[in-house]
Protein backbone atom coordinates (compact mmCIF):
# COMPACT_ATOMS: atom_id res chain seq x y z
CA UNK A 1 0.00 0.00 0.00
CA UNK A 2 1.57 3.29 -1.05
CA UNK A 3 1.58 6.52 0.93
CA UNK A 4 -1.10 8.11 -1.24
CA UNK A 5 -3.54 5.29 -0.50
CA UNK A 6 -2.82 5.47 3.24
CA UNK A 7 -3.34 9.25 3.26
CA UNK A 8 -6.75 8.79 1.64
CA UNK A 9 -7.88 7.16 4.91
CA UNK A 10 -6.37 9.74 7.28
CA UNK A 11 -8.34 12.24 9.35
CA UNK A 12 -5.52 14.80 9.62
CA UNK A 13 -5.86 15.86 13.23
CA UNK A 14 -5.00 18.80 15.47
CA UNK A 15 -6.90 18.88 18.76
CA UNK A 16 -4.34 20.31 21.20
CA UNK A 17 -5.75 22.85 23.63
CA UNK A 18 -3.37 25.56 22.47
CA UNK A 19 -3.92 25.10 18.74
CA UNK A 20 -3.92 28.44 16.91
CA UNK A 21 -5.67 29.42 13.69
CA UNK A 22 -2.30 29.56 11.93
CA UNK A 23 -1.69 25.91 12.89
CA UNK A 24 -5.22 24.88 11.90
CA UNK A 25 -4.84 26.61 8.55
CA UNK A 26 -1.57 24.74 7.97
CA UNK A 27 -3.16 21.33 8.54
CA UNK A 28 -6.00 22.35 6.23
CA UNK A 29 -3.47 23.21 3.54
CA UNK A 30 -1.61 19.94 4.09
CA UNK A 31 -4.82 17.91 4.02
CA UNK A 32 -5.76 19.35 0.64
CA UNK A 33 -2.24 18.97 -0.74
CA UNK A 34 -1.86 15.35 0.34
CA UNK A 35 -5.43 14.19 -0.21
CA UNK A 36 -6.54 13.10 3.26
CA UNK A 37 -10.09 12.05 4.13
CA UNK A 38 -10.70 15.07 6.37
CA UNK A 39 -9.23 17.52 8.83
CA UNK A 40 -10.24 16.87 12.44
CA UNK A 41 -10.15 20.10 14.44
CA UNK A 42 -11.65 21.76 17.54
CA UNK A 43 -15.26 22.96 17.26
CA UNK A 44 -14.27 26.61 17.70
CA UNK A 45 -12.40 26.53 14.38
CA UNK A 46 -15.01 24.70 12.31
CA UNK A 47 -16.67 27.76 10.79
CA UNK A 48 -13.39 29.46 9.94
CA UNK A 49 -11.90 26.27 8.50
CA UNK A 50 -15.03 25.46 6.50
CA UNK A 51 -15.00 28.91 4.92
CA UNK A 52 -11.26 28.69 4.28
CA UNK A 53 -11.47 25.25 2.66
CA UNK A 54 -14.54 26.19 0.61
CA UNK A 55 -15.63 22.63 -0.02
CA UNK A 56 -12.18 21.31 -0.93
CA UNK A 57 -11.84 19.14 2.19
CA UNK A 58 -14.26 17.61 4.68
CA UNK A 59 -14.16 19.18 8.14
CA UNK A 60 -14.47 16.82 11.09
CA UNK A 61 -14.84 17.94 14.70
CA UNK A 62 -15.17 16.43 18.16
CA UNK A 63 -18.14 16.44 20.54
CA UNK A 64 -18.08 15.82 24.30
CA UNK A 65 -14.32 15.79 23.97
CA UNK A 66 -12.23 14.33 25.48
CA UNK A 67 -13.99 13.01 28.60
CA UNK A 68 -17.49 12.26 27.33
CA UNK A 69 -19.32 12.98 30.57
CA UNK A 70 -21.33 15.99 29.38
CA UNK A 71 -25.10 15.66 29.27
CA UNK A 72 -26.74 14.32 26.15
CA UNK A 73 -28.45 17.68 25.65
CA UNK A 74 -25.08 19.44 25.72
CA UNK A 75 -23.62 17.00 23.19
CA UNK A 76 -26.67 17.39 20.97
CA UNK A 77 -26.30 21.18 21.05
CA UNK A 78 -22.58 20.91 20.27
CA UNK A 79 -23.36 18.63 17.34
CA UNK A 80 -26.02 20.87 15.83
CA UNK A 81 -23.81 23.93 16.29
CA UNK A 82 -20.86 22.21 14.59
CA UNK A 83 -23.01 21.10 11.67
CA UNK A 84 -24.43 24.61 11.28
CA UNK A 85 -20.86 25.90 11.15
CA UNK A 86 -19.97 23.54 8.31
CA UNK A 87 -18.80 20.29 9.87
CA UNK A 88 -19.26 17.25 7.65
CA UNK A 89 -18.21 14.64 10.21
CA UNK A 90 -18.75 14.37 13.96
CA UNK A 91 -16.60 12.33 16.36
CA UNK A 92 -18.43 11.99 19.70
CA UNK A 93 -17.13 10.58 22.98
CA UNK A 94 -19.39 8.21 24.90
CA UNK A 95 -20.15 8.58 28.60
CA UNK A 96 -17.70 6.01 29.92
CA UNK A 97 -19.16 6.14 33.41
CA UNK A 98 -22.52 5.09 31.99
CA UNK A 99 -20.84 2.11 30.36
CA UNK A 100 -19.20 1.13 33.64
CA UNK A 101 -22.62 1.46 35.31
CA UNK A 102 -24.18 -0.68 32.56
CA UNK A 103 -26.54 2.13 31.54
CA UNK A 104 -26.59 0.78 28.02
CA UNK A 105 -29.96 2.25 27.04
CA UNK A 106 -28.77 5.77 27.90
CA UNK A 107 -25.65 5.36 25.76
CA UNK A 108 -27.62 4.00 22.84
CA UNK A 109 -30.21 6.77 23.05
CA UNK A 110 -27.47 9.40 23.13
CA UNK A 111 -25.85 7.98 20.00
CA UNK A 112 -29.24 7.80 18.28
CA UNK A 113 -29.94 11.45 19.09
CA UNK A 114 -26.61 12.60 17.75
CA UNK A 115 -27.00 10.48 14.61
CA UNK A 116 -30.47 11.97 14.10
CA UNK A 117 -28.88 15.43 14.32
CA UNK A 118 -26.20 14.38 11.81
CA UNK A 119 -28.65 12.93 9.29
CA UNK A 120 -26.65 11.88 6.24
CA UNK A 121 -23.43 13.29 7.68
CA UNK A 122 -20.96 10.94 9.33
CA UNK A 123 -21.06 10.12 13.05
CA UNK A 124 -18.10 8.35 14.65
CA UNK A 125 -18.37 7.04 18.22
CA UNK A 126 -15.22 7.22 20.37
CA UNK A 127 -15.26 4.56 23.09
CA UNK A 128 -11.77 5.12 24.63
CA UNK A 129 -10.64 1.51 24.50
CA UNK A 130 -7.72 1.97 26.90
CA UNK A 131 -10.24 2.44 29.74
CA UNK A 132 -12.41 -0.57 28.85
CA UNK A 133 -12.39 -4.32 29.33
CA UNK A 134 -12.83 -6.55 26.30
CA UNK A 135 -16.40 -7.26 27.41
CA UNK A 136 -17.11 -3.52 27.51
CA UNK A 137 -15.58 -3.06 24.06
CA UNK A 138 -17.79 -5.85 22.70
CA UNK A 139 -20.86 -4.29 24.32
CA UNK A 140 -20.04 -0.98 22.66
CA UNK A 141 -19.71 -2.70 19.28
CA UNK A 142 -23.27 -3.96 19.79
CA UNK A 143 -24.60 -0.57 20.96
CA UNK A 144 -22.93 1.40 18.16
CA UNK A 145 -24.35 -1.03 15.62
CA UNK A 146 -27.90 -0.86 17.01
CA UNK A 147 -27.80 2.92 17.31
CA UNK A 148 -26.98 3.37 13.63
CA UNK A 149 -23.68 5.25 13.91
CA UNK A 150 -21.34 5.18 10.93
CA UNK A 151 -18.08 4.37 12.74
CA UNK A 152 -16.73 3.03 16.00
CA UNK A 153 -13.50 4.79 16.97
CA UNK A 154 -10.88 3.54 19.40
CA UNK A 155 -9.56 6.58 21.21
CA UNK A 156 -9.41 10.32 21.84
CA UNK A 157 -5.62 10.36 22.02
CA UNK A 158 -5.98 12.24 25.31
CA UNK A 159 -6.15 9.30 27.73
CA UNK A 160 -3.53 6.74 28.77
CA UNK A 161 -3.40 4.85 25.48
CA UNK A 162 -4.39 4.92 21.83
CA UNK A 163 -5.35 2.45 19.13
CA UNK A 164 -4.08 -1.11 19.19
CA UNK A 165 -4.17 -3.80 16.53
CA UNK A 166 -5.97 -6.05 18.99
CA UNK A 167 -8.81 -3.55 19.39
CA UNK A 168 -9.40 -3.38 15.64
CA UNK A 169 -9.34 -7.17 15.43
CA UNK A 170 -11.90 -7.33 18.26
CA UNK A 171 -14.13 -4.74 16.60
CA UNK A 172 -14.04 -6.69 13.35
CA UNK A 173 -15.56 -9.69 15.08
CA UNK A 174 -18.40 -7.80 16.77
CA UNK A 175 -19.58 -4.76 14.76
CA UNK A 176 -22.43 -4.91 12.31
CA UNK A 177 -21.86 -4.90 8.55
CA UNK A 178 -22.73 -1.21 8.16
CA UNK A 179 -20.32 0.03 10.84
CA UNK A 180 -16.81 1.10 9.87
CA UNK A 181 -13.80 1.44 12.14
CA UNK A 182 -11.48 4.32 12.97
CA UNK A 183 -8.16 3.73 14.72
CA UNK A 184 -6.86 6.83 16.47
CA UNK A 185 -4.11 7.84 18.84
CA UNK A 186 -0.49 6.78 18.79
CA UNK A 187 -0.22 5.75 15.13
CA UNK A 188 3.46 6.56 14.73
CA UNK A 189 4.66 4.97 11.49
CA UNK A 190 3.56 4.23 7.95
CA UNK A 191 3.94 0.53 8.74
CA UNK A 192 1.51 0.80 11.64
CA UNK A 193 -0.91 2.80 9.53
CA UNK A 194 -0.82 0.19 6.79
CA UNK A 195 -1.38 -2.62 9.29
CA UNK A 196 -4.42 -0.90 10.82
CA UNK A 197 -5.90 -0.58 7.34
CA UNK A 198 -5.09 -4.17 6.46
CA UNK A 199 -6.92 -5.29 9.62
CA UNK A 200 -10.04 -3.51 8.43
CA UNK A 201 -9.86 0.06 9.76
CA UNK A 202 -11.34 2.54 7.28
CA UNK A 203 -10.05 5.73 8.92
CA UNK A 204 -6.92 6.66 10.84
CA UNK A 205 -6.93 9.59 13.26
CA UNK A 206 -3.40 10.96 13.38
CA UNK A 207 -1.28 14.07 13.12
CA UNK A 208 1.88 12.12 12.36
CA UNK A 209 1.40 10.55 8.93
CA UNK A 210 1.69 13.77 6.95
CA UNK A 211 4.67 14.74 9.09
CA UNK A 212 6.31 11.48 8.09
CA UNK A 213 5.55 12.12 4.43
CA UNK A 214 7.09 15.60 4.79
CA UNK A 215 10.14 14.12 6.59
CA UNK A 216 9.36 16.12 9.72
CA UNK A 217 9.61 14.99 13.33
CA UNK A 218 6.54 12.80 13.82
CA UNK A 219 5.58 13.54 17.39
CA UNK A 220 2.09 14.21 18.72
CA UNK A 221 -1.31 12.56 18.21
Image (cartoon, rainbow, N blue to C red):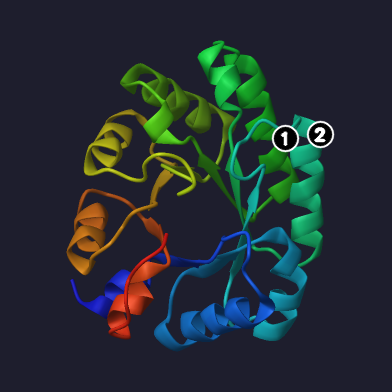
Q: Position of residue 1 (x, y in %)?
A: 18, 71
Q: Residue at x 75, y 58 (%)?
A: 82
Q: Position of residue 134 (x, y in %)?
A: 32, 22
Q: Which quadrant is the C terminus positioned in?
A: bottom left
The image quarter in which residue 139 lies: top left
Q: Residue at x 39, y 26 (%)?
A: 137
Circle 2 packing at 10 Å, graded few (<14), some (14-19), many (20+), is few
Marks 1 and 2, how far apart in space? 9 Å
Extreme-front residue of the structure: 18
Q: Residue at x 29, y 74 (%)?
A: 5
- Disc ID at residue 73: 2
Q: Earlier in the sequence, mark 1 or mark 2?
A: 2
- Disc ID at residue 76: none
**SS type, badge 1:** helix
Quick check: 102 above or below 92? above
Quick check: 83 above or below 114? below
Amino acid sequence: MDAKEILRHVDHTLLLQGATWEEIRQICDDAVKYGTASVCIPPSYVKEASEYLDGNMAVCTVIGFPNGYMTTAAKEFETKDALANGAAEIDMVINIGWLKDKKYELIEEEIRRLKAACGEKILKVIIETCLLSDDEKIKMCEIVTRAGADYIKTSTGFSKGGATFEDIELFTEHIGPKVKMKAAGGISSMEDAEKFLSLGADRLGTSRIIKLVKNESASGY
